[in-house]
Amino acid sequence: MKILVVEDNIELNNTLKEILEINNYLVDAVFDGEQALEYLNLYDYDLVILDIMLPKIDGYKVCQIMRDKGNDTPVLMLTAKDTTQDKVKGLDIGADDYLVKPFEIDELLARIRALIRRVSVEKSNIVQIGDIKIDLEKREVYKDGKSLIITPKLFCILEQLIRNRGKVVTYESLMNKCWDITDYPSRETVRANIKLLRKILQDKDIIQNISGVGYKIE
């Protein structure tokens, strides 16, 4: 899962990024509303953590622009503004949840899990392909009933292929979804990760190579 953190407080921004990465999320972090919209135009995210009081463009406007463009990525507003009027305004313009600072990390992580789960409610979270079982909610992979050790990035690649099963997932889509902006890969890097994923799954044929375009799983 890939999250965009939009928070102008540098210390809090860095802390959130660190905590989310420890919890196996891929994270891009920006510090103002303009940057947020630029990233949202370029990359796909599973969740946006959005402060309201931002430089250049405030969080309300960022959320409104997202929704006006048809971007339905879940938005968790994270802010010191705690009046009922503030909350209602955020929810009315399209935010999915609202967490007031200061907050407990455990509550933040629980809210994140709930939002991501809500989006996936109509999708099966357990996928079986031959002797391989993938639990998309718990982010676990099993082969013949035995748990496989898999990194967040490799699970992200596998998840994109599973959620688009039968369709070609392009190199560009995998790059945007599974790498952050500071570590943007080449196609060769993607190929190397696919090779490693096949090795972990112990099945070189499960992921099909679509020459020059990307990959797919049937």
Image: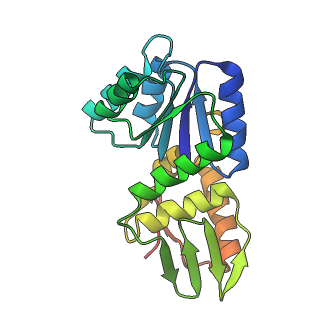
Asked which quadrant contains residue 57, the reply is top left
Q: Residue at x 61, y 47 (%)?
A: 109
Of 158 and 45, the residue lying toward us:
45
Quick one: quadrant of the C terminus?
A: bottom left
Check the image and report above or below for 91 versus 152: above
Q: Residue at x 58, y 88 (%)?
A: 131
179 sits left or right of 99 in the view: right
Q: Residue at x 39, y 63 (%)?
A: 121
| Residue 180 visible | no
Q: Where is residue 100 shown, x and y percent of the image?
A: 54, 30
Check the image and report above or below for 80 versus 182: above
Check the image and report above or below for 48 versus 124: above
Q: Where is residue 152 shown, x and y percent of the image?
A: 66, 56
Q: Where is residue 193 shown, x and y percent of the image?
A: 66, 59
State how many labels appear.
Answer: 0
145 sits left or right of 162 in the view: right
